Image (cartoon, rainbow, N blue to C red):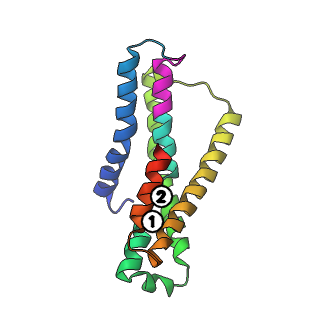
Amino acid sequence: MFAYRSESLIWMIGAFIQPLVSMAVWLSISDNNSIGGYTAHDYMVYFLGVLLVDRLTSTWDVWELDASIQDGSLSTKIVRPFHPVHWSISQNLVYKLFFAVLLIPAWAIAAACIPMLRMTISLEIIALSFFAIFLSSAIRFLIGFEFGLLAFWTNRATAIYSLYEGIHLF
C-alpha cells in the first residue's frame, strides 16, 4: 500500500465518491428538515459510516483470481510455500488496516471540528461494531474468493460477481 501511494490515493478517492454523493443528495433533499424522522445529522453519520464500513469490508480478490486463472499466473502462486488464499488474506488485512489508520482518525478530527459529525457511543457499541465489521469482512472475502474461483469453469467470473454485487447493492 505504501509502495504504490498514488494508486492507493486514486482508489481511496474513487471509494469516497459514491457515499459522499449520496450524502449530498439526501442533505439537499432534506434541506435541514426532518424526513421520516431522520435529520441532516443522521444522514451525515449514516453515509460516513457506510464509507467506513465499505472500506473495511470490501475485497477485490474476484478480479485478481479471475485474471491469474485466465493468464495462467496462478500456477506460479500454487507452488509457493503458502496457499494463494493466505496471500489474499494478508493483502486484505493490510488494505483494511491502511484505511482504518486513515479514516478513523480523520473522522475523529472532523468530528472535533464539525459538531454535526459527533456521536455518543459506548465501548460496548464500539466492540460490537468491531466484531461485526470483522465478521462481515470475512464473509465478503470468502464470497469474493469463491466467485473468483468460478474462473476455473467460466470465462467471466467478474461479470457474475458484478451481477451479484448489483443485486447486493440494490
Please report contact status of discs 2 and 1: CB closer than 8 Å, yes or no: yes
Mark 1: secondary structure = helix
Whether 58 is drawn above or below 18: the answer is below
Identity of the residue drawn at 50% across and 84% down = 78
Write down the residue under mark 2: 59
Q: Residue at x 40, y 24 (%)?
A: 26
10 Å crowding of disc 2: few (<14), some (14-19), many (20+): many
Residue 21 visible to the viewer? yes
Task: Verify whether residue 40 appears in magenta.
Answer: yes
Q: Is residue 32 above or below residue 3?
A: above
Nearer to me, 110 or 66: 66
80 is higher (above) or lower (below) than 120? below
* x and y, in percent, of residue 82 in the image: 55, 80
Kind of element beneath mark 2: loop
Magenta stretch, main secondary structure, is helix
As drawn, the residue found furthest toward the right would be 124
Three-letter code for the amino acid on which mark 2 is drawn:
Thr
Find residue 1 and report its horizontal and vertical position in percent.
Answer: 39, 59
- Residue occupying image coordinates x 50% and y 68%: 88
Residue drawn at (48%, 20%), measured in percent from left and top? 41
In the rendered structure, which segment of residues is drawn in magenta? 36-47
Q: Nearer the viewer, residue 165 or 96?
A: 165
CA neighbours of label 1 inside 10 A, class few (<14), some (14 to 19), many (20+): many
Residue 62, which numbered label? 1
User: Is residue 113 magenta-colored?
Assistant: no
> Residue 81: percent from the left, percent from the top?
55, 84
